[in-house]
Amino acid sequence: MNRDESFKETLKNKKKRLLDTLVVNEILKDKRLIKAFMEIPLEKFIPGKLKNMVQLYEDKPNLFYYDEHNPQSYRTISAPHMITIMLQGLALKANDDLLILGAKSGYISALAHQLAPKGKIVILEANSEIAKLTAENLKKLNLDNNINIIVKNPLNGMPDLSPWQKILVTGAIEQTKIFPLLKQLDRDGGVLFAPIGQDFVQTYTQILRQNDEFYGNRQLQVKFSPLITQLEIDELELITDLDEFEISNKTIASKSEPNSLGMLNKKIEIKYAKNILDKIIPEQIVIKKPVEMQNREIILSILKDVIENIQILKKEENIDECFKILDQIELVFEKLKIYKRNFEIKLKKMQQTINQIRSYVIIRKELEKKGLSNSDMIEQKISILNKQIEEINVLLSFVTKEKSRIESVY
């Protein structure tokens, strides 16, 4: 297995481990979404210069846009657990049309397309640079025919293409600002999902429309940056071909809802209740295995990932790459801490060996700086390298035994 194949396998294992954790913690419940996460590569939605390989498929936000001239204007793709909550909160059906306010680099829309492959997805994004980046990302995965991105103030929605079966808001929004969007929902079970509120904390709220009645379910408190709604006129001039961001009436027929004019001046009242979508949520995962068994599988997946990284480290000659691999192994070890007591994992022993290996790599780095002026220096380097390999073999043997122990005992 070459380095590229090994790296892809490592990412795949990280992704599986992340999804296992979301399932065990009863966050991820839609079977279709598991398949979507496995098929859509997050790394394709992050520019190379901002890509943090260590942080990929961790349950953390990923930076995908940063303006060095304006440090405040950075954007992230939401953490996987938050994306899961968003998409499950929409209860997408296969033929639903979905309006997304805020591009998030296109990753969420790509996942949504897996859940609603027969529907149309339209993204409204105020920042033209992000819109261009998103369009490029979607084109790379051949999704540009299924998902349209439009440079537009998201707060206005797309009334010309309403009704929408589903509307997703990806940034903080005041409750009064969602009323025009609610009017664009399908009268027969349209759903809006948004982080509603001001200041630093919002409440992710699910709102269901039935005729002219609206039912809300406040699900959880979140902390989102505000939805960017000011259309950037200056940036629009940077777009060489605005047509690529416009939507043709041939793509999706205009479906203005009946009696929408009568709703314009009518005050919307949201009636709050729990479990408003119980009857229409897609098939969910039922965890049949005991939690202990689920944890065992997560641990085995983590240890397998560690073993693969150790094997790569054993063959790696480049000193800087050795440091990166060691960092990756230590990051994975951090995840074992929560299982240490119940499964009697000997983390300290592993960490001590890692520290010893790192010390040898540091010595090699220092010797590299001094050059190879004589035979004594060469012998010293060979000796240090051999000691490093010995410790790597010790670590590999120990982790392999731990994996076998957990497989046989638990």
Image: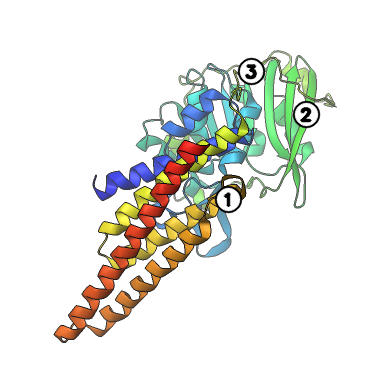
155 is higher (above) or lower (below) than 377: above
Q: Quick one: quadrant of the N terminus?
A: top left
**Mark 3–mark 1 CB contact (< 8 Å):** no
Residue 256's disc number: 3
Q: Is residue 240 visible?
A: no
Q: Label 2's element?
A: strand
Q: How many marks?
A: 3
Kind of residue at badge 2: Asn
Image location of residue 168, percent across then percent down: 63, 32
Number of the front mark, 1 or 2: 1
Give the Cα distance between marks 1 and 2: 38 Å
Residue 10's disc number: none
In the shown orientation, is residue 242 left or right of residue 85? left
Give the residue displayed 56% in from the left and 41% down from the top: 80
Kind of residue at badge 1: Lys
Q: Earlier in the sequence, mark 2 or mark 3?
A: 2
Residue carrying label 1: 340
Give the residue displayed 50% in from the left and 36% down from the top: 297
